Image (cartoon, coloured by chain):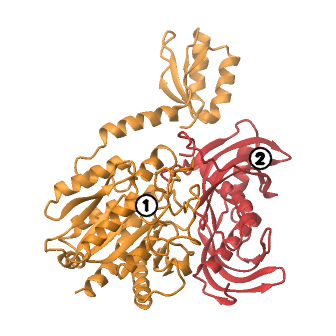
Amino acid sequence: METGELNPNYYPARRAAAVVQHYLNTRYGSPYRWMFLGNVHNASSEDVTEGRKYQLELTIQEMISNVSGPCSAELLFPGAGTPQVQASCDWLLPNNTRAQEEAFYQQHRDSHNLVSGDRIPDSYGHMEPTMKPFWHLGGVASSFIMLEQSNQSTLYNMAQVANFTQLETEKDQLRFQYHVLLHEMVSQEIIHWKMLITWSPAEGVKVLQTDLQPKCNCEDPPDSIN
Amino acid sequence: MTLHQVLRITGRDEVQHTRLQELTDMGHLQLDVWKKPIDLSTPVDIRVPSNSLQTVKALLEDADIPYSVMIKDLQAVLDQEMEHMGFRATEPKHTDDYDYGNYHNGDEIYSFQDMLVAENPNLVSKIVIGRSYEGRPLNVLKFSTGGTNRPGIWIHSGIHSREWITQASGTWFAKKIVTDYGRDPVLKAIIDHMDIFLEIMVNPDGYYYTHTNDRMWRKTRKPNPGSSCVGVDPNRNWDAGFGTTGSSNDPCQQTYRGPMPHSEPEVKAIVDFVKSHGNLKAFIDLHSYSQRLMYPYGYTKNPCKDQRELHDLARKAISDLATLYGTPYTYGSVITTIYQARGITIDWAYNQGIKYSYTMELRDTGRYGFLLPANQIIPTAEETWLGLKTIMSYTKDNTK
């Protein structure tokens, strides 16, 4: 493993930077705020007693407002377990999305019309406009899993929301059951996870339960994942 | 229209009839009246959006007005109709009428290929280089202005079936070549000296499977003896550093390399063609996603002999690609840029002496991933074409 300055375009730096992206989503993500990795500008790494430490300067893009900004981060891949991240992105302030988040929250808070959806996006990359915030929310919630599962040999993205169902609001939190497909780039596997999540503008996204779905090596009949 | 319902309502008397008219006037319910309340004997058909359903049904039940649900989920009905319509009405008879801004199934792509050849007999011919495991033809379109065994450029897409943007772009490139041959001096110069070979569906079995069963299928569809898992990763099946780290020996995994190099008929067909042609100078393998342009090697960290030149050409190609929409690409060798991978296409091609061997990962960088929206097909194809032309032009200039 290279130590010292890393080429910011090569995979060791990019994999570390993707972990920072997932971390930021767990901290700041919402149905109207979903972060992706832009460029890595500088990267270095070294072995430490607890594992492998990275220092990164990168650009993060917030997908919905289309705003990008710089972040610095320090990340530790321990021998085993969840990577530990510290990141500062001064421009990521929870202000401009407040109105949309409040409106969305109020619209769905009353459990009269519980929403659900599947195949977001569908095979053609399409989704109904009303489904978009649920797609964002699924992506943000998936970041909790992707953060936890990441190591130096992985690179995760959410491939699709297979389905989601809104459950009764509890303690002022919107609640959802999600089934997501994660794409792990190094192994090229598609990994199915179910999760129980909550969200409110005040509390942000929380993932209460996660459930890795067994990989079925049987030849499945046509299923809803199409 | 998901979970919108169509209700058929029959007011039983004057009072109910009036209530019904009042109901349809309530703007906030967003009711869409299909059949108006004209008189007592005629039922009223109303489309009710899903979020008004509870309210409307409650109002009807309170007023004791009988109703029945005629259509339980309007979207399902529409989808079925669209399928029918799509099949009958929109089958193009000419490649001018083909919808390049949409994804097509395998049958449509085969049709397209035949139409293109029929419309452009002086420029395009079809070569069947083999059959897939399930017996589908492996078609290569040859773009040529004549000559005998001119130096050639090979471009292929769809080696991994779930990477739909590649087959869609390949189709667009095919049309672009015939459209622009007479208009684009750069393209004309290329084709007057070299032949272009374009295989749009390297893995047709996989592609059909992504339409019928599993949108995320990557591999071929050949069963593996002794395993319940199907398929080999066709981009780990080439005879270049075949085996060990960088591919898998587990038939259930996505990067399963297969029992031996070139075990997959889809791969063998290309190997046989390339060897018998003997005069290819560039080889481009299209994938998605990540926005990367990469050159050999994937199986070893040792730089390939022409690394400097390939690196510089890659830089130029992605810079030209970005002139259109600013789409950023990274570039480098496979092993440094993405991961160690053994038995990949371009390592084999390069080792055959095809110097300008590149693999390209098209849009995007993970937001939509494999499920790239159809409205990005043409922009992706357009920008990728600029990068390809840079590589092809340079190849022509450096080929005797």
Nearer to the camera, A169 or B259: B259
Nearer to the camera, A194 or B244: B244
The quarter of the displayed image where residue B198 is located: bottom left
Mark 2 secondary-structure assignment: strand
Residue wearing tag 2: A175
- Chain letter for the red colouring in the rendering: A
Q: How many marks?
A: 2
Which residue does the image show at 37% across and 72% down from the upper left? Answer: B284
The quarter of the displayed image where residue A87 is located: bottom right
Mark 1 secondary-structure assignment: loop
Q: In this rendering, is residue B388 above or below A204?
A: below
Pinpoint residue A213: horizontal percent, then vertical percent.
70, 49
Which residue does the image show at 60% across and 25% down from the upper left? Answer: B23
Q: Chain of mark 2?
A: A
Residue wearing tag 1: B263
Nearer to the camera, B200 or B322: B200
- Chain letter for the orange colouring in the rendering: B
Q: In this rendering, is residue B389 above or below B302?
A: above
Pinpoint residue A126: horizontal percent, then vertical percent.
51, 51
Q: Chain of mark 1?
A: B
Distance, label 1 to label 2, CA atoms, is 49 Å
Q: Residues within 10 Å of mark 1 (few under 14, many from 20)?
A: some
Residue farthest right in this picture: A171
Pinpoint residue A171: horizontal percent, then vertical percent.
86, 46
- Of circles 1 and 2, the one toward us is 1
Are callouts 1 and 2 both on one chain?
Answer: no
Image position of B26 (left or right of A25)? left
Q: Residues within 10 Å of mark 2 (few under 14, many from 20)?
A: many
Image position of B77 (left or right of B124)? right
The quarter of the displayed image where residue B101 is located: bottom left
Asked whether the viewer can see residue A157, the reply is: yes
